[in-house]
Image (cartoon, helix red, strand yellow):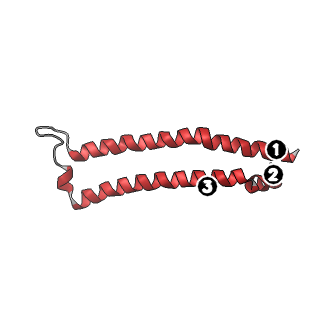
Amino acid sequence: MSSAMYERMRANPKFQELVSKRGRFAWTLAFVVLTMFYGFVMVVAFNPAALGQPVAEGSMLTVGVAVELFMFIFFWTLTALYVKRANSEFDALTQEIVKEAWKENK
């Protein structure tokens, strides 16, 4: 593809929409992940006894292990959510942008 074609794609309002939507979504997910991860690290640093408590009386499972398992599953779920949205909405917008650029190129 030529640089003129790339410029046409960048000038397309759909490209600006794609960049905006994908950026907002990625930053939102990043904020959620970093908040949870660093929040957990702060609890480990400043109140480790809270994480050492059993989930239920007589249970071998501690709050810390339960929270970590939840975070692990939650992060995988967020990744799946991003992949699903990227493969549907973001890829569809990308295909529209490329098709329009090819039409203009002819």
- Residue located beneath label 1 in the image: 102
From the top left corner, tell me how far across and down residue 46 is, in percent: 23, 61
Spatial separation of the CA atoms under disc 3 and disc 2: 21 Å
Mark 3 in CB contact with mark 2 (< 8 angstroms)? no
> Residue 60 falls in which quadrant of the image?
top left
Q: Residues within 10 Å of mark 2 (few under 14, many from 20)?
A: some
At 25% from the left and 44% from the top, the residue drawn is 65
Mark 1 in CB contact with mark 2 (< 8 angstroms)? yes
Badge 3 marks a residue whose secondary structure is helix
37 and 100: which is toward the camera: 100
Q: Amino acid at mark 1?
A: Trp
From the top left corner, tell me how far across and down residue 10 is, in percent: 73, 55
Badge 2 marks a residue whose secondary structure is helix
- Judge left or right: residue 55 versus residue 34: left
- Judge left or right: residue 33 versus residue 13: left
Q: Amino acid at mark 2?
A: Met
Name the disc covering residue 5, or none.
2
Name the disc covering residue 68, or none.
none
From the top left corner, tell me how far across and down residue 6 is, in percent: 77, 53
Badge 1 marks a residue whose secondary structure is helix
Q: Is residue 6 above or below residue 96?
A: below
Q: Is residue 68 above or below residue 27?
A: above
From the top left corner, tell me how far across and down residue 98 is, in percent: 75, 44
Label located before the other in sequence (1 or 2): 2
